[in-house]
């Protein structure tokens, strides 16, 4: 009985029939994904970015949170480059996108398509943090700022070609001092505006000073007024860095007088309005001409006054000199007196010298006397000199003869005459011993009367 009960307990129960379809886990996850995407469509969600992470693929992952909940967010790489607001942790934003899910982890997520700041306070907070960052890099230092040219020949304007801004600038320049203007048309708000503005600033700086289109001497970056969001392009880092790096002096004229953007800190001068930028760029031509005429008149007055002073000074100096004619007559009289006295002294001096010359002439003897005595002494000296030279020559001839005889007796040729011979090697060197001789060596034998014979060494003996 116990065995029967055990056997019965091991039997499988019969499956209960059901109309509910059987799904795999993947089918369920994908079904939930489709339901979420179809139910919500595009939505706007307000929250704070947190835990943002940029993957190696370029996609951005993270969370959007408030005080009550957290939702995963995804922003594809192709979307990130088009965002008007750069996602950052702690930034309060309003994102627009679609609800979806990630089947691998069964979590729903928000796929972001656009981002905007959640209120002006959050936007101002982001701008202040960006300003502090760029300021710490030294982009806003006064030492970097350049002086504006007093009268630029060419002015480059970065602005929208269709707005009232460029017309206001041109009209104001025409009123004050007409200059050549180059307009670089750009978007001043919206997607891609910041990149176009930065490219325009860099483009003006890259122009050739001697090119067909002249490089500007001054740049004006301008747009009309608008909300904080409208002016955001002029707060982007790419624009601020381009303005700070510009070699050409730059005036920022963005918005109205109360509007402030980050490009204002990096520019060399900030104008309250685009019209104000034109006033900063050039002086008033009429005022400049009036000032020039005024300076010309002041210079003429100063010159006239200085000439009058010199004339009075010259008259005073002339008065102190006295009558020049009287001074000359007095000096002429002195010269006449000295001239007469000098003539009489000169005649007396000449007479004195003539008398002395007559005395000396009487004491002189005829020149022939001296010449005869000199000739006699010269003949005697020449005779003595010839006698001495002949004695020296005779003595030298005797000495030379003795030396020649001695040399002849010591010469090897006298030895040859006695029956000897001189042995020389192939180079003409005399061989005096057998040292260094080799069997078979060629030698030359020299005899008297400069006769020679060739020989070969067959052997040597000690």
Image (cartoon, grey):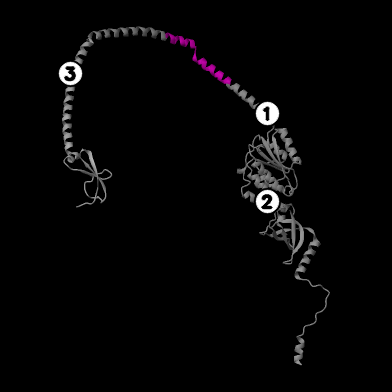
According to the picture, the residue beneath numbered tag 2 turns out to be 128
Q: Which mark is residue 225?
A: none
Does label 2 or label 1 sit earlier along the sequence? 2
Figure quadrant of the N terminus = bottom right
Q: Position of residue 183 (x, y in %)?
A: 71, 40
Q: Nearer the viewer, residue 183 or 333?
A: 183
In this view, the mark in front (2 or 3): 3
Q: Nearer the viewer, residue 374 or 14?
A: 374
Q: Position of residue 415 (x, y in %)?
A: 17, 41
Residue, x 62% and y 23% (percent of image)?
300
Where, by quadrant of the figure, is residue 429 drawn?
Answer: top left
Q: Position of residue 44 (x, y in %)?
A: 77, 57
According to the picture, the residue beneath numbered tag 3 turns out to be 380
Does residue 283 sit above or below 115 in this rendering? above
Q: Position of residue 64 (x, y in %)?
A: 72, 60
State whether residue 268 appears in this view: no
Q: Secondary structure at mark 3?
A: helix
């Amino acid at each position: 009985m116990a065995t029967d009960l055990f056997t019965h307990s091991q039997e499988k129960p019969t499956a209960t029939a059901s109309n509910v379809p059987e799904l795999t886990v993947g089918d369920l996850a994908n079904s939930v994904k489709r339901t979420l995407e179809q139910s919500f469509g595009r939505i706007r969600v307000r929250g704070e970015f947190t835990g943002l992470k940029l993957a190696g693929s370029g996609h951005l992952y993270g969370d959007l949170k408030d005080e009550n909940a957290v939702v995963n967010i995804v922003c594809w790489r192709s979307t990130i480059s088009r965002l008007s607001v750069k996602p950052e942790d702690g930034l309060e934003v309003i994102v627009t996108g679609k609800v979806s899910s990630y089947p691998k982890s069964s979590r729903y997520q928000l796929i972001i398509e656009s981002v905007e700041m959640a209120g002006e306070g959050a936007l101002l907070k982001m701008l202040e943090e960006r300003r502090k960052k760029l300021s710490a890099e030294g982009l806003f230092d006064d030492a970097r700022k350049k002086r504006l040219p007093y009268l630029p020949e060419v002015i480059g304007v970065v602005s929208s070609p269709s707005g009232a801004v460029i017309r206001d600038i041109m009209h104001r320049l025409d009123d004050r001092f007409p200059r050549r203007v180059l307009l670089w048309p750009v978007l001043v708000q919206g997607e891609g505006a910041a990149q176009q503005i930065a490219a325009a600033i860099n483009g003006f700086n890259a122009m050739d000073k001697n090119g067909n289109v002249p490089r500007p001497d001054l740049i004006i970056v301008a747009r009309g007024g608008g909300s904080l969001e409208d002016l955001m392009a002029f707060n982007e880092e790419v624009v601020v860095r381009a303005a700070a790096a510009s070699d050409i002096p730059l005036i920022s004229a963005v918005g109205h007088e109360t509007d402030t953007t980050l490009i204002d800190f990096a520019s060399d001068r900030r104008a309250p309005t685009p019209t104000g930028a034109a006033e900063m760029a050039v002086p008033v031509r009429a005022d400049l001409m009036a000032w020039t005429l005024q300076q010309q008149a002041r210079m003429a007055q100063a010159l006239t006054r200085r000439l009058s002073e010199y004339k009075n000074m010259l008259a005073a100096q002339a008065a102190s000199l006295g009558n020049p004619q009287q001074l000359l007559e007095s000096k002429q009289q002195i010269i006449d007196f000295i001239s007469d006295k000098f003539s009489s002294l000169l005649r007396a001096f000449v007479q004195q010298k003539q008398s002395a010359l007559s005395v000396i002439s009487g004491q002189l003897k005829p020149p022939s006397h001296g010449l005869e005595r000199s000739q006699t002494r010269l003949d005697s000296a020449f005779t003595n000199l010839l006698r001495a030279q002949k004695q020296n020559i005779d003595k030298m001839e005797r000495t030379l003869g003795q030396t020649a005889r001695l040399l002849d007796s010591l010469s090897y040729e006298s030895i040859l005459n006695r029956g000897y011979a001189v042995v020389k090697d192939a180079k003409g060197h005399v061989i005096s011993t057998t040292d260094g001789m080799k069997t078979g060596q060629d030698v030359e034998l020299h005899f008297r009367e400069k006769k020679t014979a060739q020989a070969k060494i067959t052997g040597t003996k000690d």
